[in-house]
Each structure stands twice: as C-alpha cells, then as structure tokens.
C-alpha cells in the first residue's frame, strides 16, 4: 500500500507533472495554437525588419509576414498542398496498409507470442525484453500483447510476474526506437526530418534507413542492459519483499493449431520467395540493378513499398491458410481497419503540416536556426556534446508530451536546421531525439499507455499505483539513458555510419 505513501515528496512531484501535462491541449489542437503563434510572430518579425545571412551561401533571408496580402493568399492556396505533400503522410499510410493486414490476420501477434514462449529459461528475461523492442514493428501492439505476456511467462516460470511485466514494459516503451528491421516509426520520423531539413536544403532527403545501423545494434545493447537491470535490481527486490509473487502456473496462450502451423509455413515459403526475387533482381542484368550500386537500387529507395507489399501478402497468406480469412474481402477489411486507426494521426498531421509550412514560408525557421546555431557555435561545445545535450533535453520534454510524432513535428523544424548549420546531419539529430524520446516513456504518467500498464500490474498486486510503477521502472529508465547515450557517443567518436551511406556529421550544406 504503501508504495505511493512511502515517499510523499516523490508522490507530490508526480502529481505536479501530471497536473502540468493535463493542462496541455490535445496534440492536434496544440498545432492549431502554434500556427496562430507563427502567424503573429511572422508579422512582428517582418515589421521589425529582421533578417540574417545564411552561412556558407551568402543569401540574405528576411522574415515574411503571414498576416499580409501575400501571406494570406499563400495560406489559402497552399492549405491542401501543405498536407498532401507533407512527407510523413503518404509513406506511413502505405506502410500501415501492409502491417495492418499482418496485424489484423493475427500473424504479428502470433510471431511475437511464440517467440517469447519458446525461449529457454536461462534466456527468458533477454527474450522478453528483445521481443518488447521488436514489437514496434506493429506500432503499439506491444503494450496490449507483450507486456501482459511478459508477466504471464514469468509467472509460469515461477518468477515474480511484476518483474516480467517491468522487463517487457522496458523493451516495448523504453526501447521503442530500436529494432532489427525497418518499422513504421522509422518512416514517420524520417518524413518529418525531411520536411525540417528542407528549410535549409530543399533537396535533402532523410531515408527511412537513415538510422538503421545504429538502431539494429541498439536492439542487442538494450536487450542486454534490460536483462542486467532486471536481474541486478528488480528480481532481488521482488524476491526479498514478496511483492507481486504468485504461486501456480498462469494460463498461457494455447499451443499452435494445425491451421496456424499451415499459415506459418505459407509465410515462410513467401519469405524465401521474396528474398530470392530480390536477389535475382539485383544480379547482373536484373531489372533493379543500377550502375550506382545497391544504395541507388529502386528496392532501397522504395523500401516502404517493398515492406508494405511483403507484409500485406504475408498477412493475407497467414489469414487464408489458417482459415481466418475466407475471401479477398477480408484483405480489404484488414486494410480498411488499419486506416481507421490512423484517423487521429491524419488529423494531427494535417495541422502539423500547416505549422511546418507556415514556419518555412515565413522564414521563421531559418532565422531561428541561424540565430540558435550562432549561439551554440559561440559556446564551442563540440558536435558530440550538443547531440548528447539534445538527448537529455528530449528526455525531459518527453515527461510532459507523450506523442513522439507531435513532439518531433514541433522540435524538428527548429533543431534539425539549427544543428545542420553546425555540421550535424539530420539523421544524427533524429537519432538523438529518438533516444531521449524512448527512455523516459516508462516513467511518465502522461504516456498514453501508462494507465493500462498500471491496470496490468494490479492483477498481481492490487495496491500498485502510478507512483509504484514509476519507482519500478526508474532503474530501467536511468540505465537505458546512460547506456544508450554512451553508446551513441562512442558511435559518433568512431565515425561509424548511422545507416547506409549516412554520416553523423556534414562538411557543409
């Protein structure tokens, strides 16, 4: 009971965070207010005649007022185009068409569940954290599948289920920006980063593979760190205190049915066929082979379409051979269902697109980026130090604004061009954001799924509250922040590419 009463000052601090966060408007409404703010600021800056010289180009940039004949005309004629051409919209919707089928058919849930359940006891914790990290393949499915599954697996193995829940929560949420595959969040954030980079370089394109090497390696780092925290801190705490320890075996999901096995075999055949076709297409004389090399291949440039096609067919095959799908109507139903879940995302992206476009047209983003870059440059902090500082800033902001897309749409137009002027690539800034955005999810009561995790925990210990869960997850949050930041700093120091052909630092625009 008393976990929430033991530290009164800690509880007051959590209450203060919750009250402050609850005062924030809905993310979409926040961008409406920000659009109005940019309009007023652009009028003020234009009235004051603010201008700056763009470093390295010798171009004079002056503020333009949105509250003017020219500005109003531009807003009216560009409103639809701002949204239709906003980079995060199209690729994310296409990606979700494929993943929507794989999720709707039950394929993704089954794969994650079976991967966790077949882990040998000695590797159980590592696999729970690892599967939690992989769950970002299907956006937020890990919160409703992997977290309760982690608790069930630990209970079935005679371990404290709350510890299994915490390990899964750390993987799902604190490791959200790591994976061994390309995920929908990669597509979403790369699109926003591209729009922000275009404030300075109109032809700059942030690839969905821009962080792939680093996120791939981070998956294994965080799995090991999460396992260490679990056994070093949480397991002794649970066993010594008796908290959350249950007796008896949990009812785990049933074994694979004959139909599910048939569906998985069909997916395996399709996977091997897809790999073979891609290899053949890139051999000499192949239709996708290019003289510029693999990175210039249409399959790499169109990786979103490739992944969407593969996952859609895999989901359809699983549904058909497992008996869950009876006709082509089920395929369309799955796609429609996935698009229905994107309604709030589309509303948010509409207003975020206007904010980014207003920011760009008014030249406010450029003025702020140049001014901020000049200030940071005068401090002589070094590029690596600036990126780690940005990690910490994002981690702090994440305690108050839970939506990663809303947060990055707000921060990217300022920080991406600002750090570009200091020789830091948009991909490196994006990765620093992703680290900070992930690690404090598990200690923020304002994170949308935090209450759901509390409800899962109360199944095993009735008096678990938000303060109790924060205390449970704090070791993961702090350790992930430290280990991931040090890993990032080491990666930067060695000059390793963040993704295929992607450097952390730029020689110039």
Image: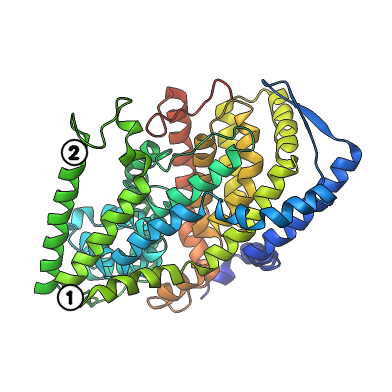
- Who is closer to the viewer here, 384 or 444? 384
- Alpha-carbon neighbours of circle 2 within 10 Å: few (<14), some, or many (≥20)? few
Q: Nearer the viewer, residue 128 or 476?
A: 128
Look at the picture and state if 108 lies above or below 198. Answer: below
Q: Residue at x 68, y 65 (%)?
A: 29
> In the image, 311: left or right of 172?
left
Is disc 1 placed on a helix, strand or loop? loop
Secondary structure at badge 2 equals: helix
Looking at the image, residue 258 sits to the left or right of residue 170; the answer is left
> Where residue 8 sits in the image (x, y, percent)?
64, 67
* Residue 328 location, quadrant: bottom left
| Residue 301 occupies quadrant | top left
Q: Eyeballing the image, is 375 above or below 207?
A: above
Mark 1 or 2, closer to the camera? 2
Numbered badge on residue 254: 1
Q: Nearer the viewer, residue 123 or 102?
A: 102
Please tell me the numbered disc located at residue 279. Answer: 2
Count residues near mark 1 (Cα–Cα under 10 Å), then give few for <14, some for 14-19, many for 20+: few
Q: Choose the circle earlier in sequence order: 1 or 2.
A: 1
Which quadrant, please, contains the C terminus? top right
Q: Position of residue 170 (x, y in %)?
A: 41, 56
Q: How many marks?
A: 2
Tag 1 near tag 2, CB within 8 Å: no
- On screen, residue 252 versus residue 52, left or right, reads left
Seen at 63% across and 26% down, the residue is: 422
Q: Position of residue 354 (x, y in %)?
A: 66, 54
Residue 475 in view of the camera: no
Residue at 87% over, 46% down: 44
Label 1, label 2: how far apart the Cα atoms are: 37 Å
Q: Quadrant of residue 106?
A: bottom left
């Amino acid at each position: 009971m008393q976990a929430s009463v033991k530290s009164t000052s800690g509880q007051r601090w959590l209450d203060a965070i919750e009250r402050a966060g609850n005062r924030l408007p809905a993310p979409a409404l926040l961008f409406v207010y920000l659009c109005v703010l940019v309009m007023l600021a652009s009028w003020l800056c234009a009235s004051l005649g603010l201008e700056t010289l763009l470093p390295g180009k010798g171009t004079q940039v002056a503020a333009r007022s949105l509250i003017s004949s020219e500005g109003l005309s531009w807003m009216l004629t560009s409103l639809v185009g701002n949204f239709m051409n906003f980079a995060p919209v199209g690729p994310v919707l296409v990606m979700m068409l494929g993943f929507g089928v794989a999720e709707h058919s039950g394929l993704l849930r089954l794969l994650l569940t079976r991967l966790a359940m077949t882990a040998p006891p000695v590797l159980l914790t590592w696999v729970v954290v690892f599967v939690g990290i992989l769950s970002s393949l299907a956006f937020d499915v890990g919160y409703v599948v992997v977290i309760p599954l982690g608790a069930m697996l630990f209970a079935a193995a005679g371990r404290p289920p709350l510890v299994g829940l915490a390990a899964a929560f750390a993987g799902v949420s604190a490791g959200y920006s790591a994976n061994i595959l390309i995920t929908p969040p990669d597509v979403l954030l790369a699109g926003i980063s591209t729009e922000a980079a275009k404030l300075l370089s109109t032809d700059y394109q942030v690839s969905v593979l821009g962080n792939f090497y680093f996120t791939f390696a981070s998956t294994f780092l965080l799995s090991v760190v999460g396992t260490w925290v679990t056994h070093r801190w949480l397991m002794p705490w649970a066993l010594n205190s008796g908290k959350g320890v249950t007796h008896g075996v949990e009812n785990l999901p049933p074994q694979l049915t004959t139909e599910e096995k048939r569906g998985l075999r069909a997916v395996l055949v399709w996977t091997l066929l897809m790999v073979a076709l891609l290899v053949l297409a890139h051999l000499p004389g192949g239709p996708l082979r290019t003289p510029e090399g693999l990175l210039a291949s249409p399959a790499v440039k169109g990786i979103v379409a490739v992944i969407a096609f593969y996952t859609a067919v895999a989901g359809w095959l699983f549904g058909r051979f497992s008996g869950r799908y009876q006709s082509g109507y089920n395929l369309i139903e799955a796609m429609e269902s996935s698009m229905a879940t994107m309604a709030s995302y589309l509303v948010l992206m509409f207003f975020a697109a206007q904010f980014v476009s207003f920011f760009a047209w008014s030249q406010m983003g450029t003025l702020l980026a140049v001014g901020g870059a000049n200030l940071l440059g005068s401090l002589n902090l070094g590029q690596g130090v600036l990126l780690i500082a940005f990690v910490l800033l994002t981690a702090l902001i994440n305690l108050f604004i839970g939506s990663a897309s809303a947060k990055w749409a707000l921060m990217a137009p300022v920080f991406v061009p600002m750090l570009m002027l200091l020789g830091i690539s948009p991909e490196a800034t994006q990765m620093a954001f992703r680290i900070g955005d992930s690690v404090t999810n598990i200690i923020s009561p304002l994170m949308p799924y935090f209450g759901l995790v509390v409800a899962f925990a109360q199944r095993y210990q009735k008096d678990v509250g938000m303060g109790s869960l924060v205390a449970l997850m704090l070791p993961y949050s702090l350790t992930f922040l430290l280990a991931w930041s040090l890993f990032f700093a080491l990666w930067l120091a060695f000059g390793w590419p963040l993704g295929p052909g992607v450097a952390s630092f730029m020689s110039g625009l």
